[in-house]
Image (tube, rainbow, N blue to C red):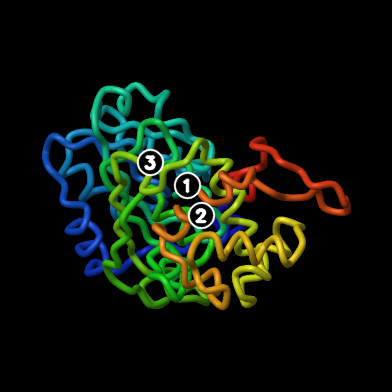
Amino acid sequence: MTPQRLGQHFLEDSSVVDSVITAADLKPTDTVVEIGPGRGALTGELVNRSGRVLLIEYDTDLADRLEARYDGKPNVRVLNADAREFGSDLDPWLSEGPYKVVGNLPYYAANPIVRNFLESTRKPDSMVVMVQREVARDMAAQPGDMSLLSVAVQVYANAEHVIDVPPECFNPPPKVHSSVLKLSPTPEPTVRFESAEDFFNLVRKGFKSPRKQLHNSLCDGLFIALQDARQLVELTGFETSRRPATLSLADWQVLYDTWVKQGRPQQVAGSTRRKRTESVKGIHRDG
């Protein structure tokens, strides 16, 4: 598949490269995974500053060129693979110890790539990634501007804005601005839950109608009576006038615990029968 068909935009600004490398805080003993190396704007610095570099490139032609460029260097490996499906727990380099992730992520795949690494049993020590600016803001949002993506990322990592990147830093220039974000995974999820699917089922449905008040959104998402949704919110001690975007991770913990104690009330769409279940589709299946 060609870069044009993939909609790739290649980084060419050296000051942005410097900012990414500085944020990655590389050491000579580090193992680094670069996602989407493309033409190698970041790759040379990664190879020079770290111990081993694993390059994951989805485009076959670009992967072949990288393979030829680093042929004979045992500390560099090239994988022609989709980072959305990459198993960090299965790779021999990454199963041996800590590693870091750096990458200019394709806009269309940024969310599932980030979630794939953050939800892995072999999480990286850090991720310094370039994504669309609005996506970066969403990932790092604070209560008042939170979204489903904000919760999905921040349950597993602390998010820090590094730098904004205008379109003219790329060739060809994209139609949108980009941002570099540093994600620092936490040792354990910041919310306690019986399963990720269970928790994110509630969060996803809590954001079903994000512009509405929380109890109305839960009514729409869980397919329960409005009075039941209002009672659920009241049991948390929250004002029923609050909207989903205002909830912090600690608030989601309270709401989740309350929902579990109430038997996880929800109904199957189109049904009048209340469903109490722990087996639900999680956020990571939503693409």
Which residue lies at the image location 34% right of the left edge and 45% below the top edge? 34
| Residue highlighted by disc 2 | 111
Q: Residue at x 75, y 58 (%)?
A: 224
**Residue 196 seen anywhere in this rendered image of the structure:** yes
Residue situated in front as seen by the camera: 228 or 212: 228
**What kind of element bears circle 1?**
helix
Q: Amino acid at mark 3?
A: Leu
Give the secondary structure at mark 2: helix
Q: CA distance from mark 1 to mark 2?
A: 6 Å
The structure residue drawn at horizontal position 61% and vertical position 75%, both measured from the top left corner, is: 213
Residue 225 in the image: x percent, y percent?
Answer: 77, 62
Are the residues tagged 3 and 1 within 8 Å (C-beta)? no
Q: Nearer the viewer, mark 3 or mark 2?
A: 2
Residue 201 in the image: state x and y as whole percent: 61, 48
Three-letter code for the amino acid on which mark 1 is drawn: Arg
Inspect the image, locate mark 2, and give the three-letter code of the amino acid beneath it: Asn
Pointer 3: what residue?
A: 66
